[in-house]
Amino acid sequence: MATTVTPAARDADLAAAWRRLTPDSAASRAVCAELLARWAEPHRRYHTRDHLRAVLAAVDRLADLAADADAVRLAAWFHDAIYDGRPGWDEERSAQLALARLPRCGVPPGRVAETARLVRLTATHAPEPHDRDGEVLCDADLAILAAPADGYAAYAAAVREEYRHVPDAAFAAGRAEVLARLLAMPRLFRTPLARELWEERARANLAAELARLAQPAPPQPGGGEPHDEHA
């Protein structure tokens, strides 16, 4: 007989991860439920709870390099909490959400401020030198670029779905520009461990996708380009 998996059971791992970051209270549980609902919004294809899980897992691998690993984890929870496909604006509103919600969860003011700062940083993925928390979060957010071939293909397809309103030719041109810019960077990842784990594979994935996009495609009517959010 088939077993029905309830949403609460499906997200038990995420709820447990949240409880490790905040003191248990009714307010904290309510914020967790709100965030899980946001990450499950129907318009999302890549920026889903699976992405949240992946970023949290990557943060765990890099946690010893952070100055405040729990602030980085909280930033992972909030970094795409508001996602409408508006670069910069989404990150700012997500940071404001963190500032509004975390104090009621009993998170200390300094960590609340650091969480919001880190969320804003994901708009550019360009932490300053020696910004240990920023480097860990940005590397964790970009770890998907080093996924195995099938996982990377699923990621690329999901990103395309989030821009399904953009005609194929326009999307390909915008996406190719993003990929070329990434490949031109001297390094994709900021922390030595992330470079060791992911740099080579990420570059291979990006180059392969760029080569696929360079293949001729039929012209499409319309216009518009995807924005520079690649993870």
Image (spheres, rainbow, N blue to C red):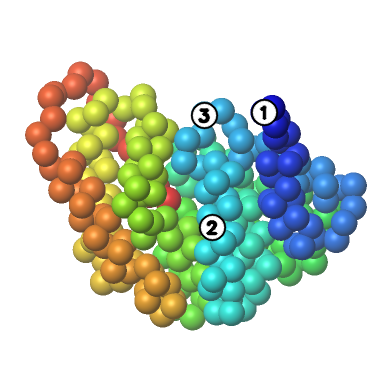
* Residue 169 left/right relative to 108: left
Residue type (three-letter) at the residue carrying disc 2: Val
- The residue where tag 2 is placed is 55
Residue 196 position within the rendered picture, expressed as x and y whole percent measured from the top left: 37, 76
Mark 2 surroundings: few (<14), some (14-19) or many (≥20) residues within 10 A: many
Residue occupying the far left of the picture:
216
Q: Secondary structure at mark 1?
A: loop
Is residue 223 shown above or below 154? above
Residue type (three-letter) at the residue carrying disc 3: His
Say which quarter of the image contains residue 189: bottom left
Q: Residue at x 85, y 61 (%)?
A: 23
- The residue where tag 1 is placed is 2
- The residue where tag 3 is placed is 43
Q: Quadrant of the N terminus?
A: top right
* Residue 58 left/right relative to 184: right
Q: Residue at x 20, y 30 (%)?
A: 169
- Of mark 2 and mark 3, the one earlier in the sequence is 3
